[in-house]
Amino acid sequence: MLCLLWMGAFGDEHLFPGVYRDYPAGKWDDWSWANRDMANASPVRSGQRSIRADLFPWSAVRFHCWGGFDPTGFTHLEFWVHGGTQGGQRFSVMVAIDGIDRAPVPVTNYVSAIPANQWVQVQIPLTALGVAPGNRISDLYFIDRRGVTEPTFYLDDIRFTRPLPSTTVSVQVNTTQTLTPITRLKLGMNVAVWDWYMTQPQRISMKRSAGFGVLRFPGGSISDEYDWRNNRSRRHGNSWGTDTQGFLNVANSIGAEKIICVNYGSGTPQEARDWVQYANITLNGSVRYWAIGNENYGSWEYDTHPHRNDAHTYAHFTRDAIQLMKAVDPTIKVGVVGTWLETDFTQRMSVTNPRTGQTVNGWSPVLLSTLNSLGVVPDFYDIHYYPQDPGREDDAGLLLSTRDWQEIMSRARQLLRDYFGSAGDTIPIFITENNSVAFNPGKQTTSIVNALYLADSLFQTLLNGAEAFVWWDWHNGTEVTNNNSPLLYGWRNWGDYGVIASGYPSGVGDPINTPYPTYHAFVLISRFAKPNDVLVSVQNSHPLLSVYAVRTPSGSVRLLVLNKARTTTLNADIRIQGMTLKTRARLTQYDATLDLQRKAPITRSLTVRGTTIRQSFPPLSISVIEL
């Protein structure tokens, strides 16, 4: 078991997720009804911006967290306040739990007086704010509760804090307690028609080295405007670089499974049927998994139906498409796209949840209820997750967000169970898009922080029941005008969803085919976990050291160790139970220093003493130990 010791404790920046750091951070958004400036240039406590607040009677600087913040492990809300030219402000602080306000706490309970012309730190215990175990914080307020106008003041560096852990970590691996098998579907990558170079030998070799077990095509929202017959966009009329045959050739050459998303937005069930005929019969492509469209709940998707982004229309299209597609190839699996909440993406009609009796009108309940009434049980349920909005990126918040998967998967499973009964327990959940930010990627996507998020997120999805994981994406493009804040770690001042550089636009970012840290993460993941391996139990509660272990069919063990601390080396004692170890092991490691030097992961040998591995892991590092 891991021990948290006060001797040698450290306060690494990545321990403390931000609510505001130059901007509302992570999943937090500005829902204020006070006069305020969220990008105030002076005074500033740290970074480049602070919040100027002018509270009129009963107004508030309010932050809303979509999905809610899980405060497990955190003890205090911390912020800095500057009293402006007058000082003496007496505003209150309060939180809402799942939308229900808790009692306000006067700031003067924790600072005797807010001084003029200087910054002062305030720390409020979460218990004083009414936060109990199991709560999720949906809102945070800095509010006037006295009915007066407060003199102008400033806020900065708002974050949640926790007890400082030790730099020494004890980890216990039980090789006899198996959890979930590794399959090809769990090691996936999105590829797209816009990649004109997908079939080049170098690209194929890089995909093979990364160990991708499944490829998804034709690429996100392009799916709903894609004419597969002509390899063109119905929306814009342009042609694309890689067609169905090219995709199948690439997937077959690396031994990967395939997922194809048929065109719901501007296609027909007959067109979906013909694609199955072409891919699996004409080309003998063995495409086992097919999805009906992509994020069809969203207004950003191209949709030519009379009712756009309509779950009822989508359900009837799905019924017709499945019948036609499986008549061609009865071995295929056809899935539907959804979310994990009942209130997302309001629909024109409502349904009643059979379990709760509540009337709801989100995309997912309307879709699942309609499918059930049509006698259609999908072969898988397809969901996407991007934990941050663009311009809100926060490294500590991103690295913490991998624990969201427990809530996401639990809610998604409950939805399936609610609307399909016992059959809902058997519908696999596929995660077919995941990355750090929803759109407009900034420098965080090309930093090693995102590589650590990728590795941690992948295995958290699997431990929480996902049957497929597909990262977004293989090859995209350089973005130079998005969030490149100096508060984010990373030396590349550009963003890119791709795991390798596209070379587009020319002269910007890295040369074509240059691997980003996320690519190196996949290479290390492929050394750690292979199809037919099984994840085994690991006991470790350190907030910045994630450890995963697999047992191979031959009985050997591999470890994946992620040090998510920004500046702190962590020293781990890893005890292996259930097997006899040899005296030598192999360590393959990638860290921030190698990234800065543009080098690939390095490999060296380790000494094993009895059943324990003692090893130091540098900050921002991904390590694989093969025993």
Image (cartoon, rainbow, N blue to C red):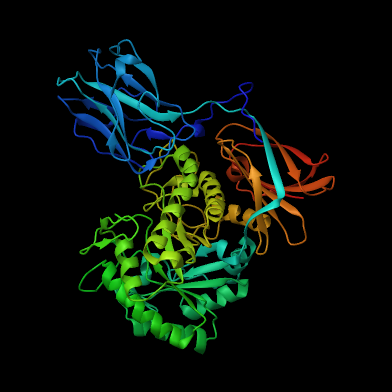
Question: Where residue 195 sits in the image (x, y, percent)?
Answer: 46, 68
Q: Position of residue 64 (x, y in %)?
A: 30, 39
Q: Judge whether 299 appears above or below 315 on screen.
A: above
Q: Where is residue 520 shown, x and y percent of the image?
A: 60, 53
Closer to us: 153 or 108: 108
Please say if 441 is above or below 610: below
What is the count of numbered marks?
0
- In the orientation shown, which residue stands out farthest toward the bottom? 282
In the rendered image, which quarter is residue 65 located in?
top left
Q: Is residue 336 left or right of residue 202?
A: left
User: Would residue 14 be seen by someone viewing this image from the given angle?
Assistant: yes
In this view, the residue in front, 176 or 236, is: 176
Q: Quadrant of the N terminus?
A: top right
Viewer-nearest residue: 217 or 39: 217
Q: Residue 292 location in percent, x, y? A: 38, 72
Q: Is 560 left, or right, of 452 in this rendering?
A: right
At 64% across and 30% down in the image, what residue appears? Answer: 3
- Pick the front one: 406 or 26: 406
Tell me if residue 130 comes above or below residue 455 in the rendering: above
Q: Residue at x 62, y 39 (%)?
A: 540
Q: Is residue 516 visible?
A: no
Residue depicted at 27% across the width and 27% down the height:
142
Q: Quadrant of residue 155?
A: top left
Q: Quadrant of residue 323?
A: bottom left
